[in-house]
């Protein structure tokens, strides 16, 4: 294993730890000096300690191969990603702004549809979205909020600009790994938390619980449950983790019933108990076989009926995924201007909508330069990274775009920022993104940091764990003069 003194960022990339000359970024100086002080043996020991801690804590995720589900230990790299607190203040303001506008938009399209009539978003873009739910028309959930939990993916380009890559508004995942990454780091590098002002993240479960409680019908002690598809879901670790952290019941669809009074009840050994709030981790399609897919065995028959009557709150609300659509994403800056009368704080990545004939012609002529994404896929699936694709792959995508232009957008191939990462005993730059989590109920909360995902394969831009990616702890560091006392987080 090499020492940290040998680390060099990749040419043409923005590195999160050091600049092109090897000098530390703001807030990174203490970490860099500390890592340089460790011997090769000490680095190896810390790496092994991190792996052992993850196994002992049972931090897993599930991947699927040949139809089988396989639990694997969470892939973790012990070099944290650091963001200076002053920059984070801007990011936080931009995340608040974005989710406010998105919730106003979702509420509008299921009610007055002013944004469609005024041409802010073409009607066809919304009504043809796979996640537009006509069953939700006329509903106004508590506080006018549909997306209560949002995981917004941010990427930094080579010039240091942070862009919003996408918004995850259906059933965003990953926050449990953000929390567990911090626990692992505090075990293997406790001394770093004594000498750096690292902003805490451990308030999130309580903030989530408060957000969910604020949605409940008028009751002093609402019953809150986490609805999971079950143990074979790839995010089951997170479902059970958050339920345990909040002190909420973890339930499957078969544990709930909607009675004749259109209230939701949970089956218990003491009989039926009323449920007030459901934090659902099931996609809309499978949520209620009466309203959506009739063949679903994961959901609760009659749940939409109970929600429509205001007898139960659901987070995120059914239908919120319409704003998750990557074609709608292209219109978010205009939605911010329309609903809030403000200029966007965080920019979108430049985006071509293939449904537009001129944009489509440009995309088809420049497939070798662009990243092509389907409108409603996640996890890095269904994408084409033009510069890395073969002629046959680009030809196949050209046919897909021509056959269904509404389903595709294109973006430039960004030079994603890098962070030093231990790979096969060598410390090398690897591309990273960042997913902070934003809560909106009666009020707002945003995590101080987020889940930094890292592409462990050299040269890869795919950071998803299901496709070989890993993660890092994310430190929002206060570089104020008073650095004598660390802020445990």
Image (cartoon, grey):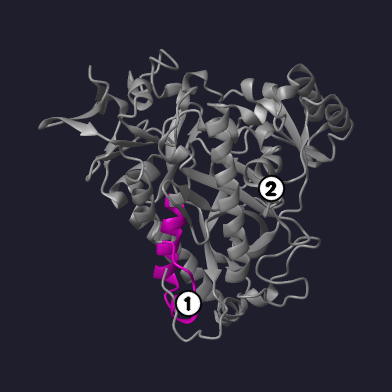
Q: Residue 254 colored magenta? A: no
Separation of residues labelled 1 and 2 (CA atoms): 30 Å
Question: Is 229 situated left or right of 37 in this image?
Answer: left
Q: Residue at x 57, y 82 (%)?
A: 37
Q: Quadrant of the N terminus?
A: bottom right
Find the magenta span and give its range: 176-201
- Residue in the picture at 38% in, 32% down: 232
- The front one of 384 and 129 is 129
Q: Is residue 479 left or right of residue 316?
A: right
Residue position for label 1: 192
Determine crowd level at label 1: few under 14, some 14-19, many 20+ residues with C-alpha closer than 10 A.
Answer: some
Does 482 sit above or below residue 349?
Answer: below
Q: Quadrant of residue 114?
A: top right
Image coordinates of residue 207 in percent, x first then y, are: 38, 54
* Residue 58 disc label: none
> Vertically, is 84 above or below 174?
below
Q: Position of residue 487 (x, y in %)?
A: 44, 75
SS class of the residue under badge 2? loop
Q: Earlier in the sequence, mark 1 or mark 2?
A: 1
Residue drawn where x is 42% and y is 34% of the image = 141
Q: Quadrant location of the C terminus?
A: bottom left
Task: Determine if residue 136 is in view.
Answer: yes
Residue that appears at 44% across and 33% down: 317
Number of labels in the image equals 2
Q: Nearer the viewer, residue 298 or 458?
A: 298
- Disc 2 designates what residue? 461
Q: Is residue 163 above or below residue 268?
A: below
Q: Look at the image and tell me whether residue 467 can be seen.
A: no
């Amino acid at each position: 294993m090499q020492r940290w003194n040998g680390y060099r960022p990749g040419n043409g990339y923005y590195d999160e730890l050091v600049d092109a000359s090897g000098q530390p970024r703001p807030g990174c100086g203490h970490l860099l000096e500390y890592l340089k002080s460790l011997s090769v043996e000490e680095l190896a020991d810390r790496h092994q300690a991190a792996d052992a801690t993850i196994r002992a804590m049972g931090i897993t995720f599930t991947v699927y191969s040949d139809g089988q589900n396989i639990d694997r230990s969470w892939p973790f790299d012990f070099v944290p990603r650091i963001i200076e607190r002053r920059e984070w203040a801007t990011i936080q303001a931009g995340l608040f702004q974005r989710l406010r506008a998105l919730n106003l938009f979702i509420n509008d399209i299921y009610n007055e549809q002013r944004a469609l009539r005024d041409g802010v978003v073409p009607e066809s873009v919304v009504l043809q979205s796979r996640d537009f739910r006509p069953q939700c028309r006329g509903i106004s959930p508590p506080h006018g909020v549909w997306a209560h939990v949002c995981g917004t993916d941010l990427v930094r380009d080579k010039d240091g600009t942070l862009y919003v890559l996408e918004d995850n508004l259906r059933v965003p995942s990953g926050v449990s790994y953000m929390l567990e990454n911090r626990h692992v780091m505090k075990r293997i590098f406790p001394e770093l938390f004594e000498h750096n002002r690292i902003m805490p993240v451990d308030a999130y479960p309580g903030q989530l619980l408060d957000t969910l409680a604020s949605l409940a019908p008028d009751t002093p002690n609402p019953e809150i449950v986490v609805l999971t598809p079950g143990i074979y879901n790839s995010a089951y670790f997170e479902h059970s983790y958050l339920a345990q952290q909040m002190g909420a019941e973890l339930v499957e669809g078969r544990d709930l019933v909607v009675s004749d009074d259109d209230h939701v009840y949970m089956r218990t050994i003491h009989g039926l108990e009323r449920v007030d709030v459901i934090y659902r981790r099931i996609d809309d399609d499978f949520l209620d076989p009466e309203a959506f897919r009739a063949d679903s065995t994961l959901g609760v028959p009659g749940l939409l009926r109970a929600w429509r009557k205001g007898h139960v709150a659901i987070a995120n609300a059914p239908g919120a995924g319409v704003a998750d659509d990557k074609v709608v994403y292209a219109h978010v800056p205009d939605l911010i201007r329309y609903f809030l009368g403000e200029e966007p704080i965080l920019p979108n990545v430049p985006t071509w909508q293939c449904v537009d004939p001129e944009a489509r012609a440009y995309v088809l002529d420049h497939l070798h330069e662009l990243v092509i994404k389907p409108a409603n896929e996640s996890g890095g699936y269904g994408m084409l990274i033009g510069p890395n694709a073969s002629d046959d792959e680009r030809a196949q995508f050209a046919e897909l775009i021509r056959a269904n232009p509404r389903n595709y957008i294109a973006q430039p191939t960004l030079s994603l920022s890098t962070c030093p990462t231990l790979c096969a005993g060598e410390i090398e730059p690897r591309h990273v993104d960042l997913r902070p989590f934003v809560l909106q109920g009666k009020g707002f909360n945003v995590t101080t940091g987020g889940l930094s995902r890292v592409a462990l394969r050299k040269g890869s831009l795919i950071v998803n764990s299901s496709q070989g990616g890993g993660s890092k702890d994310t430190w929002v560091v206060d570089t104020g003069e008073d650095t004598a006392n660390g802020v445990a987080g």
